[in-house]
Amino acid sequence: MSADARWEQVRDLFDRVCDLPPPQQRARLEADGVAPDLVDEVLALCNADTVGARVLGPVLGMLDTLAPELPPGSRLGPWRIVSTLAEGGMGRVYLADRDDGQYRQRVAIKLLRTTTGADAEQYFLRERQILADLQHPGIARLVDGGVSEDGTPYLVMEYIDGQRIDVWCESHRLDLPARLRLFADVCRTVQFAHAHLVLHCDLKPSNILVRDGVPVLLDFGIARLIGDVPEAHGAGYMTPRYASPEQRAGQPMSTASDIYSLGLILDELLAPSPATPEPTAAVHATRPTSARAARDGVRWAGRLRGDLDAIVRHATAREPAQRYASAGLIAEDIERWFGHFPLRARAKAGGMLYRGSRLLRRRWPVAAFGVLMLLMAGVFTWRLVEQRDRALAAERIALEQTAAAEQVIGFLTGIFEEADPEAGANPDITARELLDRGRAQLGDALAQQPQLRRRMLLVLGDIYDNIGLPALALDLFHEAGALGVGSGDAVQAAALQDRIAQSLLWNNRGAEAETAARAALAYVQANRLPARVEGNAWNSLGMILQDIGRQDEARAALEHALVLRRSAPDATPVEISSTLHNLGMVAREQDRLSDAEALLQQSLASKDASVGETHPRTLNTLTQLARVQREQGKLVDAETNLRRVLDLRKQVHGFDSPRVAASENDLGSVVHDLGRFAEAAQHYQRAIEIDEKHLGRDSAELAAPLNNLASAWDDSGDYARAVPLFERSLALRIANAAGADSPAVARAHANFARVLSRLGRHDEALAQWRLGNAMWARVHTAPNSAHLIVALNGGNIALARGDVAEAKRLLAQARTLDATLKEVFPLVRANVDRLDGRIAQAEGRNADAAAAFDRFIAVMQETFPADHPFLAEARLERLDVDARTPTPAQLDALAGPLERELVATHPARVRLGELRRSAG
């Protein structure tokens, strides 16, 4: 029996008896017929484990002398305690913030137990220097250190906000290759520490946290300088489950002790137990890794047999000299496993057959080709004359069929791609007509070739989606689905389900889209499809959840999609950047505008580099970035970017395309915010004309530009012109929401209420506002800027009705929301002060009103042009609460923006005329 096999047998026997009382251990082994020499070896190992457990006695004894826990708010030097993170043999670990006003930083503080004596204090001083010398991205760095007021030493460490490595692997559903690559990074980090003559001595999953996919090692508090103290033994602070035999026995340690612990950690990562074992367990499982994985139903158990079992076995050999010579060699063996090279762990056991099998795995195409050539030669020589004519005839028929199919594909694809902006074309109406003709002819041309026809339907559906005709795209995707897919082609089936879910979303059928996306995800998971395919499914689900207003769920789904797509070797840069784009959309809806801008900038840079600035995906991200900039008050930047998008869309899609209509609408919104109402109305009107032509008067896409055009007339004072547009927009949104609560419907109710109030139809306005407010509360439970807008609308409506008490209640609600939200469009935030001023004016508190109007004007001046009509309106309101009569010069300064953008019947222009007559 080899030494390794004997050690495996000893460890297995040890598992059987280690939990029995010592007197029963020998009896059990002898009753099982174990050889006497093996009995002695197993009992010696049991005795070492008992000694190792006794080593913890002093540590556990210190629990009785633990200093009182520091409450939140306590200080250690410049650090303020936030909470307790953990507690162990060495002391407690606290979460803390820097609190001396110099800069902000969050850290973890390890406080030494005061009863451990001068030796422990010197130990910690040495540990502090060790950590100061270890500068590596995979090791939690030392930030500070000191002594508390009662003389207790403490270390201030970088706070790692991550998950322990085994939990990270399970929660992110990492496959076998991803787990091995993550563990190899851990080995390289340990190798770095060993190279600097530092042992860890307590490696375990809880001391390895994963942050953003990168493992970081914690707690070098039990480290020993290699060779620094020759008599240093394994006694002290350790976790017996992951301790090496020499460490449990109190014998001298070396790098081999850390390597043993790494082997046990790798064993757990490769064969995760269905239930996480308790950290106080006496010993690690001793069965081969593959055997435990097979027992527990781990899906890659078969891949562990052989090489990976050998890596674990070599790292956890009983004798230190039999283990890997360094942690770096473990990482090297893992890389060799990926490349199908012979492992160091099998250098002795692996013979010519093993080395030959590795060579064949690396060079399998050459080997397969050689075998194929031999077979072909055999077939060719066997009955050569009889088979020659039949083989040539079959080959000729196959070539003819392939050529015919490729001709059909090339012809139809060429037609379709003439109108596909994703292929870099510049379509016009002729290309659209050609596209429609190809769609009409598709059924007849390929009626006898269903799979080829299915492929063409998908191509055509994608093109219709890309040019902004989602209803036609959805019909084609359903038609393709009815044709089925090739036998066993689950990836194609998943891709089609994903297309249908997204197309349902583009057709404003959010509830159906969610159902389809969840069904697609379940299909992917049931068939255990690759990470890229699962990432696509999670991305689609997150995008749909974001659109229907469930932002927290959307964010979780998209973050999971990003992890999967980044881990998939075949994922494209566009797929990763699309998920970043969608996360930016979620951040925007959650009023995390700075986060949204950063995510969209990342996505834009990636798309620009991979597919170019004219690609529809790039233009879509640039559009969303401009929308976020608009909401941040960066109106000039937003206008510049949206004009760029509009110009490029006209080049890519033609002047008369639904995509161009969407860009006209977006540009109109920014121009509207800048106070150029008439110009904004022209952009909105152009968007409506294009959408009505291509999508029909009942299309859901018309709701947004109709609402925006109504708002432009509303802001300019042409209320009668705005009302039918608001009514039509609201009706479209209700029809397309299919009876479900919808953020778009809630906004439409609130906007309609505003104009009804300005027309004096107060009861109707109140009814509309209540509908929108109730719906918004159901759609969005977390506070956001829309809640603030609804509260302000309600306050102005109540004030117009003469209900000052209700207006004040809603103002208080708005102020609470304003204090809660971090980033809000400046005009929305300023309108809180404007409502405050109007209420004060209604109550005759002119001084308070003047102060509130001044605050509104100050905010407006920071973001908006000096000639903005809203600024002129506010200055006019400010003059009304001033004790002095305005001068003609003051009134003339207001006349320009008011008369340029507001109709003559607007209340501000009417009031301006009254003041001019009074002043004149």
Image (cartoon, rainbow, N blue to C red):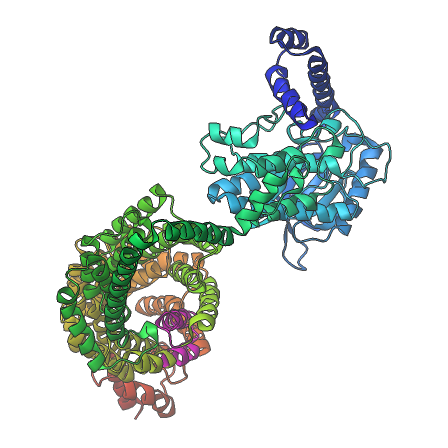
Would residue 875 be visible to someone looking at this image?
no
Q: Left of 792 or right of it: where is 264? A: right
| 429 magenta-colored | no
Residue 644, given in percent of the width and then of the height, sits at 38, 81
152 in relation to 640, above or below: above
Please tell me which residue lies in front, 87 or 726.
Answer: 87
| Magenta residue span | 614-643
| Figure check: 311 above or below 839 | above
Percent x, y for residue 857? 41, 76
Q: Nearer the viewer, residue 518 or 473?
A: 473
Quadrant containing the N terminus is top right
Give percent across and percent down for residue 71: 63, 38
| Rendered image quadrant of residue 658 | bottom left
Query: Mostly what secondary structure, the magenta segment?
Result: helix
Q: Is residue 41 left or right of residue 576?
A: right
Examine the structure image and report whether residue 618 is included in the region drawn in magenta.
Answer: yes
Expressed as whole percent of the image width and height from the top left, the position of residue 137 reads 66, 53
Name the outermost residue toward the front. Answer: 385
Residue 258 visible (yes or no): yes
Left or right: where does residue 675 sit relative to residue 373?
Answer: left
In which image quadrant can residue 759 be found? Answer: bottom left
Residue in view at x 75 percent, y 39 percent: 255
Can you say whether 433 is above or below 114 in the image? below
- Which is more toward the observer, 190 or 136? 190
Residue at 49% x, 44% y: name it. 174
* Screen quadrant of the C terminus: bottom left
Seen in the picture, residue 236 relative to 563 is either above or below; the reply is: above
